[in-house]
Image (cartoon, grey):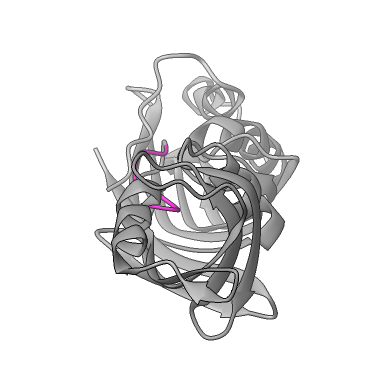
């Protein structure tokens, strides 16, 4: 699911390269290298915290790598306000200078409603967007649709349900109301087609697939899994 192959020489690679010269890096050195490398492997972020457990430096292996990222930006998705990832069974190939394997990975990410609104503003079919999440898995969107064939000069209230599909998050519009009146099922169907998926991490460098989505404390929670096998 995930592809971490890179042709450039990164800080993380430089740390592992010292293994072949007999200079074994400390856990702290590898952690600092990973913090820089994650800006590319996962996505640009304000910062990453990394903790490595069970590092066998000469073998290029670690039992577990725990990552916490803040304000992570990935294409085709709203900003992830917080991302927590557990990577298990990490293997680095010293000869080919690349990450060879992550046996399993689990990821939890949180999305703020204002970040979802900013993401949807980039969709050509919506303008003036605001978003509110409601437990367990619904959202209300205030926006002005700009879909061909529908003339709605003022904002409408869009209701719908969030769900996973093929590793992405979809927003199925169930109702569109303007001035207290339903705008009809046809517009709901057109909006569903036009704005989905609302979160797609499958094309990110680590190819994350979302397996569960729900609302907790007014934030959208995404749970995902993945693995790397070169």
**How far from the left and from the top, in percent, is residue 43?**
56, 37
Relative to 65, is 187 on the left or the right? left
Is residue 183 positioned above or below 70 on the image? below
Front-lying residue, 178 or 134: 178
Label total for image: 0
Relative to 59, is 220 on the left or the right? right
Q: Quadrant of the C terminus?
A: top left
Give the quadrant of residue 174: bottom left
- Report the residue at 50% width, 46% height from top: 77
Is residue 97 positioned above or below 228 on the image? above
Give the quadrant of residue 29: top right
**How far from the left and from the top, in percent, is residue 183?**
43, 66
**How far from the left and from the top, in percent, is residue 197?**
37, 52
Any part of residue 104 in sight: no
Q: Report if residue 198 lies within the magenta region.
A: yes
Is residue 97 positioned above or below 35 on the image? above
- Report the residue at 45% width, 46% height from top: 151
Front-lying residue, 213 or 230: 213
- Report the residue at 52% width, 25% height from top: 13
Front-lying residue, 200 or 53: 200
Any part of residue 54 in sight: yes
Which residue sits furthest bottom?
136
**How far from the left and from the top, in percent, is residue 146?**
48, 41
- What residue range appears in magenta? 197-204
């Amino acid at each position: 699911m995930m592809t971490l192959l890179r042709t450039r020489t990164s800080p993380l690679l430089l740390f592992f390269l010292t293994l072949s010269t007999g200079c074994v890096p400390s856990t702290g050195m590898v952690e600092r290298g990973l913090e820089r490398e994650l800006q590319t492997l996962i996505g640009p972020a304000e910062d990453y915290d990394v903790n490595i457990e069970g590092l066998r430096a000469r073998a290029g292996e670690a039992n577990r790598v725990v990552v916490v990222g803040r304000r992570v930006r990935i294409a085709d998705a709203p900003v992830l306000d917080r991302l927590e990832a557990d990577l298990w069974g990490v293997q680095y190939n010293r000869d080919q200078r690349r990450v060879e394997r992550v046996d399993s990975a689990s990821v939890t990410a949180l999305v703020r409603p204002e970040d979802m609104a900013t993401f949807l503003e980039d969709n050509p079919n919506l303008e003036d967007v605001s978003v509110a999440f409601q437990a367990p898995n619904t959202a209300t969107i205030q926006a002005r649709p700009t879909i061909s064939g529908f003339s709605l000069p003022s904002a409408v209230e869009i209701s719908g349900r969030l769900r996973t599909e093929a590793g992405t998050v979809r927003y199925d519009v169930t109702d569109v109301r303007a001035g207290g009146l339903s705008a009809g099922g046809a517009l709901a169907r057109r909006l569903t087609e036009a704005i989905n998926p609302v979160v797609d991490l499958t094309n990110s460098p680590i190819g994350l697939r979302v397996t569960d989505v729900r609302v907790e404390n007014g934030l959208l929670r995404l749970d995902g899994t993945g693995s790397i096998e070169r």
